[in-house]
Amino acid sequence: MATPPHARSPAPESGGRGFGRWPWWKRWFGQRSERRAAQYLRRTLRYRILAANVSDAAGELDLFALDGRTLVVVEVRSVSDPDPMRAAASVDFVKQRRITEATLRFLKRRRLLDVAVRFDVLAISWPPGREPVIVHLPNAFEPTGRFQFFT
């Protein structure tokens, strides 16, 4: 008997980055977390969501939001255990550098280099059987690497 299409694992992507290399359940978990993060930013903090899942050569930028006149680059991290800070701690120096470089490329393409930019991390914990716990870390890190922004 043939395996039904929904039960097959996705074919691995040939070399590139992105969701294609993740199992379906990780893609679903990540997308659910990003939707919840956007909802939280919109409803609770009154941010205006400008873009989601912006592709870049170095990966993907999760969310772009507007807080007043500041463009906020939001990195969404999530875990299935009760501690959201474990997810937030996963945004290490290497990840910060990738986000900084991708953001600069995004701003250059759109000629937005004169816009104030802030980097936030939004960590979501999805404990089994309970509502998610959301921790927002505004200004979680400064731009890093050789592409540091001018002040």
Image (cartoon, rainbow, N blue to C red):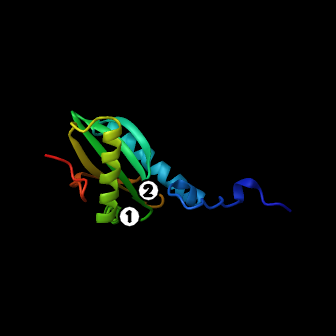
User: Relative to residue 146, is residue 58 drawn left or right?
Assistant: right
Specify the quadrant that holds the N terminus: bottom right
Q: Is residue 37 above or below residue 12?
A: above
Mark 1 element type: loop
Whether residue 75 is visible to the viewer of this picture, yes or no, is yes
Q: Horizontal and vertical percent for residue 16?
A: 53, 58
Label disc, if present, on residue 82 of the rendered structure: 1
Q: Which mark is residue 130?
A: 2
Q: CA distance from mark 1 to mark 2?
A: 9 Å
Q: Is residue 103 above or below residue 16?
A: above
Task: Kindly identify the residue that appears in the image at 77 percent across and 56 percent down.
Answer: 4
**Residue closer to the observer: 53 or 32:** 53
Label 1, residues with CA under 10 Å away: few <14, some 14-19, many ≥20: some
All told, the count of numbered labels is 2
Quick check: marks 1 and 2 in contact, CB under 8 Å?
no
Q: What x and y, as percent, mark residue 21?
A: 56, 60
Q: Residue at x 58, y 60 (%)?
A: 23
Q: Nearer the viewer, mark 1 or mark 2?
A: 1
Mark identifier at residue 69: none
Residue at the outermost left position: 151
**Looking at the picture, which amino acid does disc 2 mark?**
Arg
Amino acid identity at mark 1: Pro
Q: Quadrant of residue 25?
A: bottom right
Element under label 2? Answer: loop
